[in-house]
């Protein structure tokens, strides 16, 4: 598949999702970039903003098997990964896969479960497999976790551990719809004869794997790679940050910048791709100092400042021909 074909296909997927989901296209493209780069996505918003619908719509439009896990305070790790069940007829234990065995797994309200249960997703997100009672079980390919969470200020929520946050390639927010979007939501409810918008498959599993392969083949020139490294290093020296971007975070920014180029129909990454995706790809990985937290400094503010400080490399036109 060529890059222009991939860009057109991805645009069609986003258009299909927007037929049902009232959300800013930029946010949907951020989620799409995470999927193309074989990453996982965290959606944070207050209840009622369409997080669950968005995740389900992505699975449908991509033609992938979908599973939903509702995280609650009493959810156990085995409820996610599956467990061995004794069969009286055979006298043997048989593995019963949990809901994590799907292409797109919606981890709904992930921060309503305690950290021990949240960590049950760690191996799955990192390795594409789960280990139960010493036995390793491979997960389907592609495998994408789209997790939703409410702000930590909400009652009954737990802070996601740093290690868990770092597993997500993208963290973004749907936000409230604009005036036009809000009116659309009202019109859908007002006209009961009007069919509820639904999402239809645009591609299938094999096509998704092809799209991911196209993303992995995007060229990233040396100066652009240095730019990525400089941005991530700068987060570690900012006085407002206790813990900067990890080496894993550096790799994820590199990977998702290639996906961002695919969305633009380019065979190479330019600095603008990195600028557009750096916030969603890096901000959630930062641990701010107590003083910065008290002062109300946001992680996105730090990333914006770092982008302002780092020199943008000049692209050689001949190298991108």
Image (tube, rainbow, N blue to C red):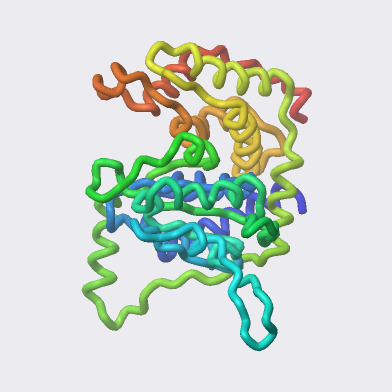
From this viewpoint, which residue is outermost toward the bottom?
Answer: 89
For the point 66% across and 60% down, the residue is: 139
Image-based side of 300 in relation to 271, left or right: left
Which is nearer the eye, 258 or 81?
81
Is residue 9 visible to us here? no
The image shows residue 226, relative to residue 258, as above or below, that is above
Image-based side of 138 in relation to 50, left or right: right
The image shows residue 19, relative to residue 194, as above or below, that is above
In which quadrant of the rendered view does residue 72 lie?
Answer: bottom left
Which is nearer the eye, 293 or 257?
293
Image-based side of 258 in relation to 291, left or right: right
Q: Residue 101: x percent and y percent?
A: 60, 64
For the point 29% across and 42% down, the residue is: 152
Is residue 137 visible to us here? yes
Q: Residue 143: x percent and y percent?
A: 62, 56
Which is nearer the eye, 213 or 182?
213
The image shows residue 54, relative to residue 232, as above or below, that is below
Which is nearer the eye, 73 or 230?
73
In which quadrant of the rendered view does residue 50 lie?
Answer: bottom left
- Give the position of the C terminus as an image quadrant: top right
For the point 73% across and 47% down, the residue is: 214
């Amino acid at each position: 598949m060529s890059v222009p074909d991939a860009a057109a296909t991805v645009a069609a997927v986003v258009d299909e999702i927007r037929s049902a989901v009232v959300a800013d296209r930029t946010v949907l493209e951020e989620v799409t970039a995470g999927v193309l780069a074989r990453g996982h996505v965290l959606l944070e918003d207050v209840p009622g903003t369409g997080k669950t619908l968005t995740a389900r719509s992505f699975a449908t439009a991509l033609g992938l098997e979908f599973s939903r896990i509702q995280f609650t305070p009493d959810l156990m790790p085995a409820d996610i990964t599956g467990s061995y069940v004794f069969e009286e007829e055979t006298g043997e234990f048989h593995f019963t896969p949990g809901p994590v065995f799907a292409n797109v797994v919606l981890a709904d309200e992930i921060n309503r479960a305690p950290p021990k249960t949240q960590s049950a997703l760690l191996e799955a997100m990192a390795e594409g497999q789960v280990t139960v009672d010493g036995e390793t079980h491979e997960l389907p390919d592609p495998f994408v976790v789209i997790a939703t969470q409410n702000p930590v200020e909400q009652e009954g929520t737990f802070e996601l551990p740093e290690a868990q946050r770092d597993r997500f390639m993208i963290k973004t927010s749907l936000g409230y719809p604009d005036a036009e979007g809000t009116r659309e939501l009202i019109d859908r409810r007002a006209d009961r004869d009007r069919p509820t918008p639904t999402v239809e498959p645009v591609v299938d599993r094999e096509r998704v794997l092809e799209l991911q392969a196209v993303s992995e083949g995007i060229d990233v020139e040396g100066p652009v790679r240095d730019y990525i490294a400089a941005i991530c290093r700068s987060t570690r020296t900012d006085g407002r940050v206790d813990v900067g971007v990890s080496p894993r975070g550096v790799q994820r920014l590199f990977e998702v910048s290639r996906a961002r180029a695919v969305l633009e129909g380019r065979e190479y990454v330019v600095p603008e791709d990195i600028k557009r995706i750096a916030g969603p790809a890096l901000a959630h990985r930062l641990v701010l100092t107590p003083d910065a937290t008290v002062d109300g400094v946001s992680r996105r503010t730090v990333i914006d400042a770092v982008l302002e400080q780092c020199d943008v490399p000049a692209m050689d036109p001949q190298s991108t021909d």
